Amino acid sequence: MAKTTSILQDMSATDPDFKVCVQVDGESRVKTVIWCNGKNRLDYAHFGDVVTFDTTYRTNLYNMPFGLFVGVNNHFQSIIFGGVLMVDEKTPTFEWAFRNFIDLMDGKHPTTILTDQCKAMQNALRSTMPHTRHRWCRWHVLKVLKEKTGHVYNKHSAFKKEFHAIVNEETDVESFERMWHQLIKKYKLQGNKYLRRIFKWRDMWAMPYFLGTFCAGMTSTQRSESANHLLKKFISRSSPMHLFVKQYNKLLDSRSQAEDEANYVSKQVFTVKVEDGGDFVTCDCGFFDHVGLLCCHSLKVLVQNNIGKIPPRNIVKRWTLWARESRPLHLANEGEMGELSSQTTYRRNVLYVAAMDLIKEAESGSESFQTAFAAICEAKEKIASKKASDMLIDTIAEQANPVRHTITDIGAAAALTGHLARPNASAPPCAADHPRQPQPIEGIRSLARFRRLALIRLRRGDWAKMSISESFA
C-alpha cells in the first residue's frame, strides 16, 4: 500500500486539482479509495448531468471490485469522471463511495445515474442522491435475461427477435405491456422469476418509461462496460494495486488524447455554397459526394438561411421511399406488362407498407380501430363485387365470342346470337355444307362493344333487360 500512497501523492503534487479520499477499517487497513484528477472534475462540471456507474471489473491481487463513474462529452465520447477501489459491494461501502464522489465534485449531483440491478447500490443511491433519477442499465437487464431464459432464448430464434422488438422499439406504455404479456403467454414463461421481477420494475429500464428522463443518449451502462474493456488493455488482472493506479492514469491520458482529436476535427472550417438559386448545396468536407446525404455543415447553413427544405438536387433517390418506383434501363422497353403497377410483387409490397401504417395509426384507440376496420370491410366488398362482375362479363362474352367458337351450323349460330351471323340478302339459301365463316375483326369489335354495354347495364342493375343480340345490332 505504501507504493500506492506514494503514487497518489505524486499525482497530487503535479495536479493541484487532484483529490483523493481513503476509507480505513479499525485496524488502519485500507477499505475503499476514490480519486479523480483536475480533468475529471472539469469534465464533470460540464457533462456530469448523466452518469453511469459499474463495478464489474475485478482488479489486483486481492480481487477488489473497481467502480467507474463514466459520462459522455459533447462529441458523444465516453469520458471518465473518477474511479473507486472497494473491498466489497455492500450498501455501506456504496454509500461511502457515492457520498465522497459528490464531495469531490464540489457537491454537484447528477440528474440521472444508470447502474446495474444491484440492490445494495439502489439502497445507497436512495440515501446519498435522493433527487437523482436512478435507472437500470437496459444492456445489463438484457444480458441477464439471456442467462435466465436460455432454454427459450437459444431454442426459439423468434423469441429473441420479438423480445428485442418490444424492448428496443416500442415507446407506448399500453402497447409495451400488452405485447409483453402476449409474448410471455406465447412462450409459456409465466413462471420465470426474473421476467416477473424486471416487469415489476419496468419503469427502471423499459424504453416507454424513459421518454421523460434525460439520459444524454445513454440508456445503458455499456459506456462503463466499454471503459472496463479499455482497462483490460492497460491493466492485467494480476497487477498489484500501485501498478493498477499507474496504468489507470495511462487510460485517462488515452481518453484525453481521443477528445483532443475530436476537438481538432470539430474546429475545422469548411466552406458551404448554396448554388442554382437554392437548388443545390455543396460543402468541401466531401460528405455529400461520398455518402449522398447532406453533412451537418450544409444543414446548419440551410437553417441559418431560413431554407426549410432540402434542395432538390441534394435528394438522392436511392435514399428515398421511392427508390424502387422507376424501371431499370434494361427493362425500359419490355411493354406494358413490365410496368411496376402491374407486377404482383410491387403491388403486394405497396399494400403491405400501407397496411402496416394503417395498423399503427388505428391500434391506438377504439374509435380509430372501428373506422379502419369499417374501411377495410368496405374495400373488401368493393373488390369482391368488381371481381364477380368481371367474371360474369367474361363468361357471357366467352360464349358469345365468334372468334373463340367455330360455328358450323348457321341455324345454331342464329339461335345463339340472333343477327350475329346474318346472311347477305343476295346470298343463296344457307346450307350446312356451305356455312358462312365468321370474320375475326367483326368478332373482336362486336366483343368490345358487348363488354362496354354489359358493364353499363351491370352498373345500372338492369342486366336482365339486355339480350346478347342487342350488343351486336
Image: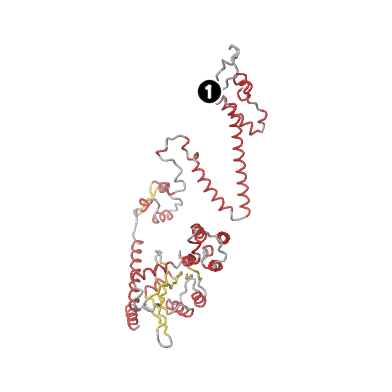
Give the answer, above or below, for where 413 lies relative to 96.
above
Q: Residue drawn at (57%, 15%), measured in percent from left and top? A: 433
- View extreme (bottom): residue: 27
Q: Quadrant of the N terminus?
A: bottom left
The answer to whether 241 appears left or right of 438 in the picture is left
The answer to whether 104 appears left or right of 372 in the picture is left
Give the residue type at disc 1.
Pro
**Foreground residue, 400 or 176?**
400
Q: Which image quadrant for residue 449?
A: top right
Q: What's the coloring here? A: secondary structure
**Foreground residue, 403 or 442?**
403
Residue 9, image x, y percentages: 33, 81
Residue 448, image x, y percentages: 56, 27
Residue 352, image x, y percentages: 52, 47
Q: Which residue is mark 1?
A: 440
Count the labels in the image. Answer: 1
Residue 91, image x, y percentages: 49, 78
The secondary element bearing badge 1 is classed as: helix
**Foreground residue, 457 or 194?**
194
Q: Which image quadrant for residue 296?
A: bottom left
Q: Quadrant of the C terminus?
A: top right
Crowd tier of the residue under label 1, counting other residues whose Cα lies within 10 Å: few below 14, some 14–19, many 20 or above: few
**Foreground residue, 453 or 58?**
58
